Every structure is written in C-alpha cells, then in structure tokens.
Image (spheres, helix red, strand yellow):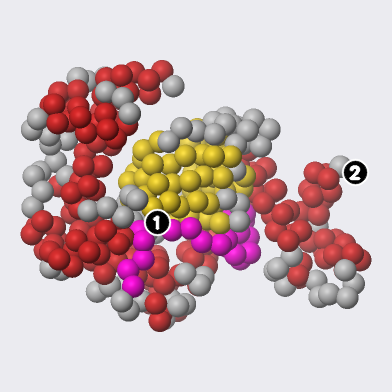
Amino acid sequence: MTTAATTQALARSPDRLADCYAFLMPDLPSPARTGGDPLRRAACLAELARWAEAFAPHDGVHATPIPKLRLIRASAPSALTHVMYEPAVCLLAQGRKQLQVGDGLVEYDPAHHVVAAHHIPVAGQIVEASPRRPYLCIWIDLDPALLASLLAERGTAKGERHRDGNVPRGIYAAYTGDQLLDAVLRLCRLLDTPQHIPHLAPLVHREIMYWLLAADDGWKLAQLVTPGTQSQRIGLAIDWLRRHYREPLDMDDVARAGHMSRSSLNAHFRAVTRMSPLQYQKQLRLLEARRLLVTQACSAEHAAREVGYQSASQFNREYTRAFGNSPLRDARLLRAA
C-alpha cells in the first residue's frame, strides 16, 4: 500500500490509527485518542485537501453551498496582489502564503491559520504551490454577532489579562489547534451531503467561532466585539471610513465615529491596521478604482472621480506607485490574466 493510500485508510479509521500508534510506540499514551497525534493531524489535513480539491477543481475562488464557506485554489506561486481582507478565518490544507500588512508581515501554512478581525488592505502572495500540490485555502467568514453571543455565554475570552493596554493587530496568524481543524473538516464534509447543510452547517460554524475564542489568542478576536475596547472602537472608525472613503478626510469625524480623541485614534488605528487613517482611505480608493477599471473598462479619469480624487495626475501617480503599472496598463494586464 502506498503512503497516500495508508494515510487515506487511517483517516477513515481513527481506531486503527490509534492501534498503529500503540504498536509503534507502546510505552507512550496514544495522542490519537487525546487529540495530539501528529499522524492523525496529517490525516485530517490530507482529507481536508481532498475536499478542497473536489469542490475547487480549478484555480480561483469558489463559492460553496455553505454560505459562509469559500475555497481558494492556486497551482503556482503568485505575484504580490493587493486585496481587501474581510473579517474571516483562513486555513490552508496545502501551500503557504505571505501577507504584507502596512509595514508588517504575516505568514501562514497548514500549521497556522490567519484571522482577519477587521477589513484590512493587504498585499498577499502565495509562495508555495504547484500543479501536483496546489495551494488550497478554506475561507470561513467571521460572524461578529455570533462571536458576541458566544462571548456573553462563556464569559471572558481566554487570555483576558492581555485585554487591558494591548491593542491587537487587525490581522494575525495563530497555531491551528486540533479542535479547530476537526471542526473545519466536518464543515467541509457537509459539502458531500447538501441536504444536511441548512441544519448542521450553522452548528459547525458556531463551533468554529467558539474554538477561535477559546484559543490562547482568543482575546484578540474578543476585543473586536467587546464594547469599549480600543479594537472595537477602531472597528467603528474603519466602518465609517469604508462608508465615506470618497469624501475628503476629516480626522475629527473619524475620531467621533470611534468615540475617541484624535491622538488616541491615530495611535490605535496604526496598531490595528499598521497604517494611518489617511493611508487606509487611500488603499480603499485605489482598490475600488482598480475594480472599476477592470470590470467596467472605464477611463482612468472616470475611476479617479468615482473614488474621490480631485486630481487625475495625483491618482495616476499613487496608482502606479501602489500597483506598479499605470491604471490602464494594469487593468489590461488584469483582464488578460
């Protein structure tokens, strides 16, 4: 039997895996029954990759019958791509990715997931992928209302001691615990039984949100939905900027939206997003202009006006600096790709 076939057989039979572990290392307790077995973890990742490949048969982003679940596949490393990460948790069954967040770097792989607690502009790059072992990402939307409900039910998040005086980044990588991995795998298994999705998917999604809060770094996510924390206030400021990004930036308006002073806004906004409110607004404008140029094939001047630029030359300079090409050339390349 091949190694792959052995792994598949073990994945279908947890008891057999435990017996195999006991045979190989009889003097040690079996982590296969306690949730710490590396063989069981490898089998879970292998099965997760099979589900992802089955429901993401070609490169790209794939919606699924589960409303909060998307699958992403890539067969080769990618160039640096500017995107807006929405609140979500992303786990990799295969591959590796890097995110440039302001002046910081976030990396994740099959051992680590990434949590985007806010809407954060990033420059992402897939650094490990091939046709034989494609990059496979499981994207699960966060639900702030559900997180708040769970937090109220279970009390404070683990690591509450970190909540005072610390403002977590709006996007961070964390070790993927066995409980979280198992819940994500069970969510993906539901793709094979669509008749059960309406009844069971919300329950498994709730469990995934629970394990995120219960993790050692669950306090970071808990701050997002805890009224009065700096992270929650920055979230309000981010929401305001996303609604008003076309307008001239008034820092007093942004500070009022976040219920904080201007000095506090500047300090904590940078701590969460790794950029200033002005830089954040610029990223929003440029990403929306890029979308308009690609999807509507409009002129650069029209895109600039639509996103709030008063000067077409300033728009061209900032667009070229951000994306490496002039607006029209960049749009042509993206449409061709």
The residue sitting at 80% across, 57% down in the picture is 13
Q: At 36% from the left edge and 66% from the top edge, which residue is drawn?
A: 168
* Residue drawn where x is 17% and y is 30% of the image: 315
Where residue 304 appears, x then y in whole percent?
Answer: 16, 29
Depth order, front residue of 320/293: 320
Q: Earlier in the sequence, mark 2 or mark 1?
A: 2
Label 2 amino acid? Met
Give 35 or 125, whichever is nearer the viewer.
Answer: 125
Quadrant in which the N terminus is drawn = top right
List the residue tagged with mark 2: 1
- Residue 111 at x, y = what percent? 60, 56
**Between residues 33 and 336, which one lies in front from this camera angle?**
336
Relative to residue 61, is residue 284 drawn left or right? left
Give coordinates of residue 319: x percent, y percent.
Answer: 24, 31
Give yes or no for residue 303 being in the magenta stretch. no
> Is residue 192 visible from the viewing direction of this image?
no
Name the side, left or right, on which 91 lies relative to 99: right
Q: Residues within 10 Å of mark 1 (few under 14, many from 20)?
A: many
Q: Is residue 176 visible?
A: yes
Tell me the amino acid under the disc marked 1: Ile
- 198 left or right of 254 in image: right
Q: In the rendering, which numbered label is found on residue 171?
A: 1
